[in-house]
Image (cartoon, rainbow, N blue to C red):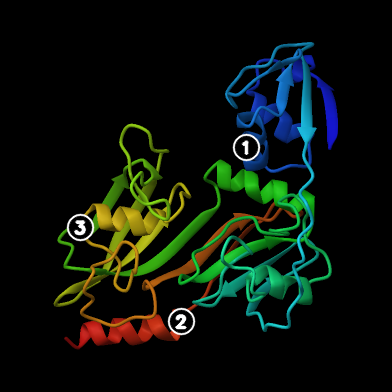
């Protein structure tokens, strides 16, 4: 355990506590927010639990850095579809069925992290030993693009874009039913489902802000192919929002119809486009990848109904 002590200067006076710490520490904004909420940050000796707390000139901020216990996470020779790579980051097309990092129930060595440990020499340490390099996640049965950080500088830079909603992520999804409107804005807060710990749900009173832009690409007899653009990044956001408007994603085993007319290997959801500012060059970069074979098969079956 390590404690850092910082003093607020005039340039940072009247800043939010989480913003001040993220500018001074090699930690992601999400890590800092979590540390504040868990009581690991003090201002003038008093624990502050609100990331939005405003610091003043000459305030003393102490910040406890907790070390994660090492786990026996092995590297594994799993072929990765690397779309782009340089000294700071990788962009990967994750296959359907691959878990991003080890967690409860997923320590079998077949996660993206296990594959990265075999293929990549350096990964950022900000998310600890369980999630090295992982800036953001996509679900096990969602295919498509995600960015991985090779060093802490890149990780913080990319994480801040996620927090500020300047990293753009777009998905294709095949949903149940025919959506009559061409464009939809779903603004519905998301929180944990109180009746099922594995699920999320729309929670108007206690949920966190969640915004999804939906554009209809193609209407079929019983289904609709849509593009979904995330403005926020809540767990299962697109899946929850599509269920909320009564158009759940085809093949979704959690939020979809109990009886599926089209048999699919997981939800037909694909992260096809990713745009961010490169941490070193400050240039905007956009990456795209085609639908995986399962998405193509199920969409074609829906067209032919």
Residue at the spot of label 1: 34
Q: Nearer the viewer, residue 238 or 220?
A: 238
Res 292 label: 2
Which numbered disc flags the more N-terminal residue, 1 or 3? 1
Instruction: Count neighbours of disc 1 (C-alpha within 10 A) and say few if under 14, some if 14 to 19, many if 20 or more.
Output: some
Q: Could you say which quadrant of the image residue 29 lies in?
A: top right
Q: Establish if 246 lies above or below 111.
A: above
Q: Establish if 106 lies above or below 214.
A: below
Q: Residue at x 66, y 41 (%)?
A: 31
Label 1 – label 3 distance at C-alpha: 33 Å
Image quarter of the C terminus: bottom left
Side of 150 relative to 112 (left or right): right
Label 1 – label 2 distance at C-alpha: 35 Å
Q: Nearer the viewer, residue 241 or 86?
A: 241
Instruction: Count neighbours of disc 2 (C-alpha within 10 A) and say few if under 14, some if 14 to 19, many if 20 or more.
Output: some
Side of 34 relative to 120 (left or right): left
Secondary structure at badge 1 equals helix
Residue 219 pos. (x, y %): 20, 72
Label 2 – label 3 distance at C-alpha: 25 Å
Residue at the spot of label 3: 246
Which numbered disc flags the more N-terminal residue, 1 or 2? 1
Q: Nearer the viewer, residue 252 or 14?
A: 252
Residue 256 pos. (x, y %): 28, 66
Q: Establish if 169 lies above or below 112.
A: above
In contact (CB < 8 Å): disc 1 and disc 3: no
Q: Residue at x 60, y 46 (%)?
A: 161
């Amino acid at each position: 355990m390590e404690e850092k002590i910082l003093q607020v200067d005039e340039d940072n006076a009247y800043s939010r506590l989480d913003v001040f710490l993220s500018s001074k520490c090699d930690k992601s904004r999400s890590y800092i927010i979590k540390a504040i909420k868990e009581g690991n940050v003090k201002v003038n000796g008093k624990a502050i639990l609100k990331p939005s707390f405003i610091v003043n000139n000459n305030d003393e901020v102490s910040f406890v850095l907790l070390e994660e216990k090492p786990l026996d996470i092995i590297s594994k020779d799993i072929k990765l579809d690397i779309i782009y790579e340089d000294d700071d980051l990788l962009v990967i097309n994750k296959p359907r069925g691959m878990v991003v990092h080890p967690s409860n129930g997923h320590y079998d060595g077949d996660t993206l992290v296990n594959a990265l440990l075999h293929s990549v020499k350096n990964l950022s340490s900000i998310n600890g030993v369980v999630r090295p390099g992982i800036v953001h996640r996509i679900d096990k049965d969602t295919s498509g693009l995600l960015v991985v950080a090779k060093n802490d500088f890149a990780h913080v830079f990319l994480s801040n874009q996620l927090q500020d909603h300047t990293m753009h992520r777009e998905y294709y999804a095949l949903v149940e039913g025919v959506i009559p409107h061409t464009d939809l804005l779903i603004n519905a807060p998301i929180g944990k489902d109180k009746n099922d710990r594995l699920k999320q749900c729309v929670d108007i009173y206690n949920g966190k802000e969640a915004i999804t832009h939906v554009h209809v690409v193609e209407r079929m007899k019983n289904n609709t192919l849509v593009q979904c653009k995330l403005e926020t990044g809540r767990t299962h956001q697109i899946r929850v929002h599509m269920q909320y408007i009564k158009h759940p994603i085809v093949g979704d085993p959690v939020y979809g119809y109990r009886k599926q007319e089209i048999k699919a290997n997981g939800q037909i959801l694909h992260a096809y486009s990713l745009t961010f500012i490169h941490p070193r060059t400050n240039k905007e970069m956009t990456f795209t990848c085609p639908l995986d074979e399962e998405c193509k098969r199920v969409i074609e079956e829906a067209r032919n109904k």
